[in-house]
Amino acid sequence: MPVPAHPRSHRPAVSSRPAPVPVRAPASPRPAADRVEIRLPWWAVALPAVAFAALLLMIMSPGQAQAATAAPALGQLIERTLHLLAP
């Protein structure tokens, strides 16, 4: 025996008052199912904070900076590499 998918609609008695207008919630930009929770590891927050603090300390005390007296290590490394590669 077939079962009806929807029950028969019930019609209320006619009244003199107008039917209330349903209030709709404001539309959100995205449905709740599209939200993604982003979790960062502890070091993703700690490393930029430490770098910022180190740069801030360098800016706050520029009077203690001294010029380097020895030849730069990077220059020496490049020079030795070129000597090794040169025929």
Image (cartoon, rainbow, N blue to C red):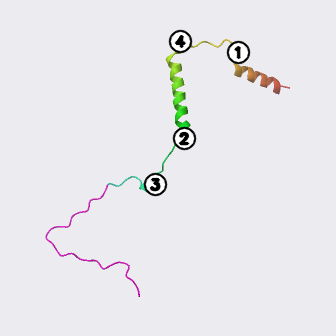
User: Mark 1 is on which residue type?
Assistant: Ala
Cα distance in 3D space between marks 2 and 3: 22 Å
Residue positioned 57% across, 14% down in the render: 65
Is 49 positioned to the left or the right of 25 in the image? Answer: right
The image position of residue 32, as x and y in percent, is 42, 55
Question: Looking at numbered disc 3 in the image, what kind of residue is underneath it?
Answer: Asp
In the picture shown, does residue 86 fall above or below 35? above
Q: Which mark is residue 71?
A: 1
Q: Give how far across and how far down residue 72 sits, in percent.
A: 69, 18
In the image, which disc is placed on residue 34?
3
Q: CA distance from mark 2 to mark 4?
A: 37 Å
Q: x and y percent of residue 24 in the render? A: 29, 59
Q: Which mark is residue 63?
A: 4
Looking at the picture, which amino acid does disc 2 mark? Pro
Residue 77 rendering spot, x and y as whole percentages = 74, 23
Relative side of 50 to 16, left or right: right
